[in-house]
């Protein structure tokens, strides 16, 4: 019967095979003791549960027992672990019979065995109930406290060895301050132990004691990490009390005060440690008043999920979404914000602080209890995972690793249920707790903000307006009072709309806090919500589609252009959850659809209104896809150019039809020639449409009548498209025509031919390099292009005189048109290495060589650049440098328009606009936006060097 009890107990171990192998190894290691061990296993249920619980869970502790077989006796006592005895037990292991203290390798080995022996006792008490039901077992908090007490005992024991090696006492010389989980009394089985050293009098001796202690404990027990000290690893290992105080007053960052929340003296000179704790406390609880608190808290927030490999994001217990750091950060930030005036929140323990937040009404009691339970569950899993091999790990097994899941489930007391195996039940429980933590993380931060502006008081959540404003400020909102007003406006009342907003806002406020402009994002969201409050599907989409909410928050918190367009093209909102639909059809398909829709309209006004509406939709769609990183620069330019062309085509056709109907005849054919960026299909969000209008008289019609008719059509198109509108302007610019603004708006084909033959200047030939037919009569457009080809691709190239003229004009343009006070290193158009530099260089080479290099006969800057190396006109690295600068400057101009809502030509020099532009380029919120500006300057400076060579020297 006794043997059956042992076999049954083995079957209940987390890994029965591992437990059986462990027993066999102990038998082989000490055959003489096996009989006694076997007898204990058969007769004593408590011992059996403890030993088999350890052997079935931890191969590392099985190794320890095999190497030190006598250690199993410690598990037969009534209590297999007693934290009150840790310090004495470890110290006793270091003392020889003659009373002297072991040193060097001998001390390290003795401390290692003693430490592992005590760790064995903690694990046995923690695991025994899993094998033998009904055994008393400690809670998570008790296990963490025992592990912390053991770590403190190890630090004290290491200091004893250090004193023996140095021949001096730490009294009056050195205090050891525990930080992190040790300071919070919440250590894992395997943790680095974070410490800070405070010295007095002889700092040289204090440093020797500290470094020796770190060496001894590091080799025997765990790594001792002093990187949280002032200046980190670059700073002195030991500082005086005054040295610490001076550093914290002058140089410390907010995260350092967050770390000091858990500072607690644990070894060395007790009085010195007490003085340190008293010194840092006021600094910690005034950290939220610091000028840079908001920016640094935002960085701390982002570190929660930072540096997690994407393939591990869903399995990371510590750093992943819904992980341990989510809980710890939430608790610590609320402590920093509210602990300034509420001393009850000033606990270094995460669980104690969370309970105090619940009791104080800063967090709902039920929410605090749920979050605490989820935190304990994840910490328990962390303990079980680390026990396996006594290694630091926070990685939950993959869903496909059924064996590891089963073993971890058994070690965690998870039973099979509801048709799920133990491993499947564990996986479901793990995911449930992760989602719960993330939901509560958002709710705990933001739900009280909603309650603080509600008319109905609540007992569970009672933030004052001032406390709510403080919390918003801590999360990055620069105008918290205004934000509270927006929250109140969105959530007031008892309507279904208000109820949905109350559910959405905690998530949105959290998402806005991660954008460059949280205040602007919230304001825009209010405007969009109020504008679309009668749109039946608006809130339903936000409520039901999480991806839409995430993307909308990013867009509204980054761009001032998007919200203005969104209220007038709300249908695009429904595309935000599906990248494939958002990227949408090809530009050609979009253009075809737009022309067809415009053509169906009954009159000119309706046609232009339809063109504007469809253009708005496309502009918003492209802007959203651009900001979300779904479109590259050339694709953005092509899409914007294509929709502009389609709008022109539709408007021209409608105006032509109306004028034709009024006259009852067709005096002329008309063609529109795209110039500049429109001709090159390189438009940005704020670009005008540069065009030329050309006509040809119908048979029997005079040139004058033809021009009159065509001019009335062209003026109608310009006026209708250029009418004031909330949308970005639709300016049709014909200033590149012969004689500029003083010349006729429309000319006949023959008039153009005569003008260019007699009066055309070299800059006009350069302008024609971008000319392409875009609207109107196909045959006329093609003949116009054929007519200008010999002008823009001159036979024999460009003579030296005209080349000098091009260079002179460029220099004059840069001098006269560069805005006063503009920084040439930041001006995307006229600055060094900017768009003008690249485009004038390409165009000069086209004028000189396109007659003999067919690849240069293109209106596209990028296509021409691609041709240069093969033609021997530039090296590959030179062409690549120009291409990189052109793409960068183009995207920066586009990003500036998206961020500010108006056309800008300079990279922002600092502030939120620069941060927003950097985020559009994929920079993380933690990155210094100044680094993006440095990158822009470096790339354009390199391009400018190429321009100097190709444009002026070659």
Image: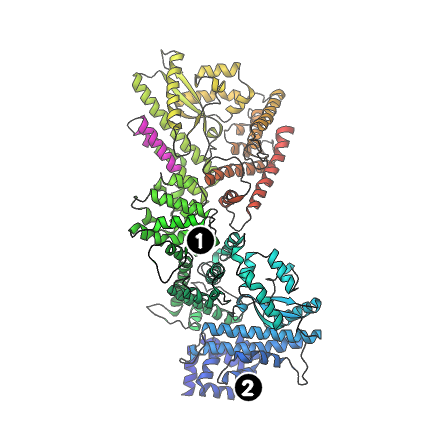
- In the rendered image of this protein, does residue 264 appear above or below residue 46? above
Mark 1: secondary structure: helix
**Was residue 608 drawn as part of the magenta stretch in this picture?**
yes
Residue closer to the observer: 456 or 405: 456
Relative to 275, does residue 705 appear above or below in the rendering?
above
When asked about the image quadrant of residue 878, the answer is top right
Residue toward you, 569 or 413? 569
Q: What is the crowding at mark 1: few (fewer than 14 residues within 10 Å), some, or many (at least 20)?
A: many
Look at mark 1 in the image and give the residue it sits on: 469
**SS at badge 2:** helix
Q: Position of residue 714 (x, y in %)?
A: 39, 22
Quadrant, the N terminus: bottom left
Q: Measured from the top left, where is residue 459 in percent x and y?
A: 36, 62
Q: Position of residue 856 (x, y in %)?
A: 54, 29
Would you name the residue on which mark 2 appears? 31
Q: Is residue 53 above or below residue 609?
A: below
Mark 2 or mark 1, which is nearer the start of the sequence? 2
Decide if residue 881 is on the left or right side of residue 463.
right
> Which residue sits at x=44%, y=50%?
480
* 460 to the left or right of 270: left
Q: Which residue occupies 59% across, 64% down?
A: 279
User: Looking at the rendering, which quadrant does residue 46 occupy?
Assistant: bottom left
| Residue 220 appears in the picture as rendered | no
Q: Is residue 898 visible?
A: yes
Q: Is residue 253 left or right of residue 603?
A: right
Label ID, residue 87: none
Q: CA distance from mark 1 to mark 2?
A: 70 Å
Image quadrant occupied by the C terminus: top right
**Which secondary structure class fits the magenta region best?**
helix
686 or 680, nearer to the observer = 686
Residue 316 is one of the magenta-drawn residues: no
Instruction: Give the extent of the magenta segment.
Output: 596-618
């Amino acid at each position: 019967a006794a043997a059956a009890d042992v076999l049954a107990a083995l079957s209940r171990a987390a890994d029965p095979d591992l437990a059986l192998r462990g027993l066999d190894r102990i038998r082989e290691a000490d055959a003489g003791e096996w009989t006694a061990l076997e007898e204990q296993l058969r007769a004593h249920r408590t011992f059996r549960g403890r030993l088999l619980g350890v052997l079935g869970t931890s191969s590392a502790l099985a190794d320890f027992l095999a190497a030190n077989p006598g250690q199993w006796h410690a598990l037969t006592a009534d209590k297999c672990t007693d934290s009150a005895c840790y310090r004495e037990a470890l110290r006793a292991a270091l003392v020889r019979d003659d009373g002297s203290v072991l040193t060097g390798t001998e001390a390290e080995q003795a401390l290692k065995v003693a430490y592992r022996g005590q760790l064995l006792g903690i694990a046995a008490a923690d695991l025994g109930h899993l094998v033998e039901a009904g055994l008393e077992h400690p809670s998570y908090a008790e296990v963490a406290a025992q592990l912390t007490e053991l770590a403190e005992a190890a630090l004290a024991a290491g200091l004893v060895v250090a004193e023996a090696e140095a021949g001096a006492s730490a009294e009056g010389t050195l205090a050891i301050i525990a930080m992190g989980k040790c300071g919070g009394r919440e250590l894992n089985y395997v943790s680095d132990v974070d410490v800070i050293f405070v010295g007095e009098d002889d700092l040289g001796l204090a440093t020797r004691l500290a470094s020796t202690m770190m060496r001894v404990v590091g080799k025997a027990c765990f790594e001792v990490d002093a990187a949280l000290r002032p200046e980190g690893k670059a700073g002195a290992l030991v500082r005086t009390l005054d040295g610490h105080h001076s550093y914290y007053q002058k140089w410390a960052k907010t995260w350092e005060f967050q770390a000091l929340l858990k500072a607690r003296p644990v070894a060395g000179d007790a009085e010195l440690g007490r003085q340190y704790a008293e010194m840092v406390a006021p600094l910690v609880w005034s950290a939220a008043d610091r000028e840079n608190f908001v920016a640094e808290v935002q960085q701390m927030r982002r570190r929660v999920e930072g540096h997690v490999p994407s393939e591990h994001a869903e399995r990371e217990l510590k750093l992943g979404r819904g992980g341990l750091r989510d809980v710890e950060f939430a608790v610590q930030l609320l402590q920093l914000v509210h602990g300034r005036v509420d001393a009850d929140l000033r606990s270094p323990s995460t669980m104690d602080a969370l309970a105090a937040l619940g009791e104080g009404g800063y967090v709902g009691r039920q929410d605090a209890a749920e979050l605490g339970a989820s935190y304990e569950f994840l910490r328990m899993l962390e303990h079980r995972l680390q026990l396996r091999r006594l290694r630091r790990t926070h990685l939950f097994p993959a869903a496909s690793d059924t064996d590891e899941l089963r073993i971890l489930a058994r070690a965690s007391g998870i039973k099979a249920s509801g048709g799920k195996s133990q491993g499947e039940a564990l996986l479901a429980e793990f995911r449930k707790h992760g989602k719960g933590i993330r939901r509560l993380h958002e709710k705990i931060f933001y739900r009280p903000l909603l309650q603080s502006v509600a008319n109905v008081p609540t007992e569970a959540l009672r933030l004052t307006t001032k406390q709510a404003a403080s919390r918003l400020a801590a999360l990055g909102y620069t105008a918290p009072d205004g934000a509270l007003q927006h929250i109140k406006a969105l959530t007031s009342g008892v309507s279904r709309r208000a109820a949905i907003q109350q559910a959405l806002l905690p998530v949105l406020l959290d998402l806005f806090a991660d954008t460059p402009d949280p205040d602007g994002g919230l304001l825009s969201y209010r405007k969009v919500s109020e504008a679309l409050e009668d749109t039946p599907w608006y809130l339903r989409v936000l409520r039901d589609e999480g991806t839409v909410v995430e993307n909308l928050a990013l867009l509204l918190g980054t761009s001032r252009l998007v919200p203005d367009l969104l209220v007038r093209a709300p249908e695009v909102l429904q595309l935000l959850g599906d990248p494939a639909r958002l990227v949408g059809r090809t530009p050609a398909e979009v253009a075809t659809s737009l022309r067809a829709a415009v053509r169906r309209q009954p009159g000119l006004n309706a046609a232009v209104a339809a063109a504007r509406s469809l253009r708005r939709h496309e502009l918003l769609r492209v802007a959203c896809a651009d900001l979300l990183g779904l479109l590259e620069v050339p694709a953005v330019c092509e899409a914007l150019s294509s929709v502009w062309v389609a709008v022109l085509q539709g408007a021209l056709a409608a105006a032509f039809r109306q004028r034709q109907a009024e006259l009852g005849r067709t005096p002329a054919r008309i063609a529109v020639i795209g110039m500049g960026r429109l001709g090159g299909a390189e438009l940005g969000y704020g670009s005008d449409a540069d065009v030329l209008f050309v006509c040809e008289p119908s048979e029997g019609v005079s040139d004058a009548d033809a021009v009159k008719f065509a001019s009335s059509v062209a003026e109608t198109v310009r006026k209708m498209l250029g009418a004031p509108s909330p949308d970005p302007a639709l300016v049709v610019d014909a200033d590149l025509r012969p004689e500029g603004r003083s010349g006729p708006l429309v000319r006949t084909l023959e008039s153009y031919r005569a003008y260019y033959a007699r009066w055309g200047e070299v800059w006009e030939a350069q302008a024609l390099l971008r000319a392409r037919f875009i609207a109107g009569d196909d045959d006329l457009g093609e003949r116009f292009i054929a007519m200008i080809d010999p002008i823009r691709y001159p036979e024999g190239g460009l003579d030296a005189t005209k080349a000098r003229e091009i260079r002179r004009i460029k220099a004059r343009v840069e001098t006269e048109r560069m805005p006063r006070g503009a920084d040439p290193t930041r001006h995307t158009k006229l600055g060094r290495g900017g768009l003008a530099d690249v485009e004038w260089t390409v165009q000069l080479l086209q004028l000189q060589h396109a007659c003999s290099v067919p690849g240069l006969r293109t209106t596209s800057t990028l296509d021409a650049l691609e041709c240069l190396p093969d033609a021997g006109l530039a090296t590959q690295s030179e062409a690549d440098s120009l291409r990189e600068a052109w793409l960068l400057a183009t995207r920066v101009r586009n990003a500036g328009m998206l961020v500010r809502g108006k056309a800008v030509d300079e990279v922002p020099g600092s502030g939120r606009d620069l941060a927003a532009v950097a985020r559009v380029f994929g920079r993380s919120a933690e990155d210094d936006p100044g680094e993006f500006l440095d990158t822009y300057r470096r790339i354009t400076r390199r391009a400018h060097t190429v321009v100097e060579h190709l444009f002026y020297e070659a």
